[in-house]
Image (cartoon, rainbow, N blue to C red):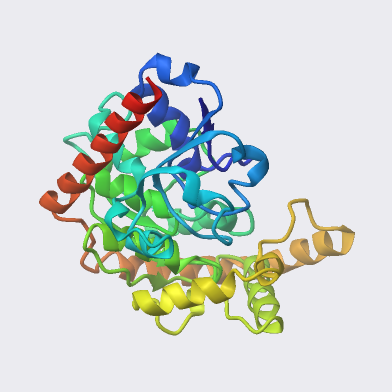
């Protein structure tokens, strides 16, 4: 069996959890199944992450995956969908009864991977991995009296930081999901205007939680220029960047925006720029702009010091337990079907 998930060469915590969780959770014989694919953690229920070249002619099982970052994948209606991340993804596929929660919640049954110290006392700051590449978030965390966590680190290193956390402030959605799973209070923030409220709302609705993130802004001049470029690119194609949508609390609005946003070729035009460093002029501009970074760092740190005073989020124990039971049932059905 093949685990299908987004793989980034530099690493990304939420996606990389797939290997850690499924290898521990599933019996060995399941991985011996041929022509079988499992889609688990991530916003991978889309045609980019699950193209026909990877799914055609195979038994595809879905547990806890969510829509986002592209149109729905071709051929999904022939898959074995055992459960999806939340009610927004479930509505898109016309199967509301399949709404569960993100399958990273299964960490709650794997204490060898995830546990929290009785002396947890740190406040974590976890930006999205795209924000790390252009910002000064390690400096911001120090200035705000917080512990910086890079989602590009290996899973074990990130989990070690979570084991000592009393609060998690995060732009990375799986920072919030893992915090909630470990029963650590958390707060959502927005750094980049490309932050996707659809996926956040899909997950938070699954646990009867609101989603009202606080905007922090850029931590460097280079990052601020990139944010403006994202907004300009979206405007050029008649869109707004996702984090600037007018009504991210409305499920109906998010569904309608998803259907419009991921009409091709608009989705391609709005995506993150291709990887690769800036050219000579870009490197010079970035180097020159660093003289302004101190101002951005202090401004972001000041906002974070105020944000940590807000009431944090944490799902109710009964809501969380109910969803984990559903996920566990889906895992049992997978094992039975493959076995």
Q: Residue at x 55, y 65 (%)?
A: 219
For this rendering, which residue is in front, 334 or 40? 334
Residue 320 in view of the camera: yes
* Number of disc labels: 0
Q: Residue at x 64, y 58 (%)?
A: 134
Q: Position of residue 101 (x, y in %)?
A: 30, 50
Q: Residue at x 16, y 53 (%)?
A: 319
For this rendering, which residue is in front, 206 or 180? 206
Q: Residue at x 66, y 61 (%)?
A: 272
Q: Position of residue 280 (x, y in %)?
A: 88, 58
Q: Position of residue 60 (x, y in %)?
A: 49, 37
Q: Is residue 268 left or right of residue 297?
A: right
Farthest residue toward the right?
280
* Residue 82 vertical position relative to residue 191 in the rendered view, above or below: above
For this rendering, which residue is in front, 157 or 65? 65
Residue 150 in view of the camera: no
For this rendering, which residue is in front, 86 or 73? 73
Q: Position of residue 1 (x, y in %)?
A: 51, 25
Q: Is residue 173 left or right of residue 47?
A: left
* Residue 249 vertical position relative to residue 13 in the rendered view, above or below: below
Q: Is residue 96 left or right of residue 239?
A: left
Farthest residue toward the left?
318
Q: Is residue 87 left or right of residue 199?
A: left
| Quadrant holding the C terminus | top left
Image-quadrant location for residue 284: bottom right
Image-quadrant location for residue 274: bottom right
């Amino acid at each position: 069996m093949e685990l299908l998930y987004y793989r980034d060469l530099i690493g990304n915590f939420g996606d990389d959890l797939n290997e850690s969780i499924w290898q521990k959770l599933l019996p060995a014989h399941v991985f011996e199944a041929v022509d079988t694919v499992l889609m688990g953690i991530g916003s991978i229920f889309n045609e980019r992450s699950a193209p026909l070249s990877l799914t055609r002619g195979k038994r595809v099982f879905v547990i806890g995956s969510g829509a986002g970052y592209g149109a729905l994948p071709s051929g999904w209606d022939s898959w074995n969908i055992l459960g999806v991340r939340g009610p927004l993804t479930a509505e898109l596929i016309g199967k509301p009864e399949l709404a569960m929660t993100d399958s990273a919640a299964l960490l709650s049954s794997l204490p060898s991977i995830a546990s929290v110290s009785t002396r947890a006392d740190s406040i974590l700051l976890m930006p999205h991995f795209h924000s790390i590449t252009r910002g000064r978030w390690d400096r911001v965390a120090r200035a705000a009296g917080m512990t910086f966590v890079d989602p590009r680190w290996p899973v074990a290193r990130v989990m070690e930081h979570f084991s000592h956390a009393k609060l998690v402030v995060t732009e990375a959605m799986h920072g919030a999901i893992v915090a909630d799973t470990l029963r650590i209070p958390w707060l959502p923030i927005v750094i980049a205007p490309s932050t996707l409220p659809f996926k956040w709302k899909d997950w938070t609705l699954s646990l009867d939680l609101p989603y009202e993130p606080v905007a922090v802004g850029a931590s460097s001049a280079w990052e601020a220029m990139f944010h403006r470029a994202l907004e300009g690119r979206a405007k050029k194609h008649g869109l707004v960047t996702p984090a600037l949508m007018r009504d991210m609390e409305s499920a109906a609005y998010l569904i309608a925006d998803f259907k419009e946003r991921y009409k091709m070729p608009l989705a391609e035009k709005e995506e993150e720029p291709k990887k690769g460093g800036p050219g000579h002029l870009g490197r010079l501009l970035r180097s020159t702009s660093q003289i302004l970074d101190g101002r951005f760092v202090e401004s972001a740190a000041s906002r974070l010091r105020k944000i940590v005073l807000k009431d944090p989020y944490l799902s109710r124990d009964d809501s969380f337990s109910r969803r984990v039971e559903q996920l566990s049932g889906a895992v049992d059905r997978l094992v039975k079907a493959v076995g």
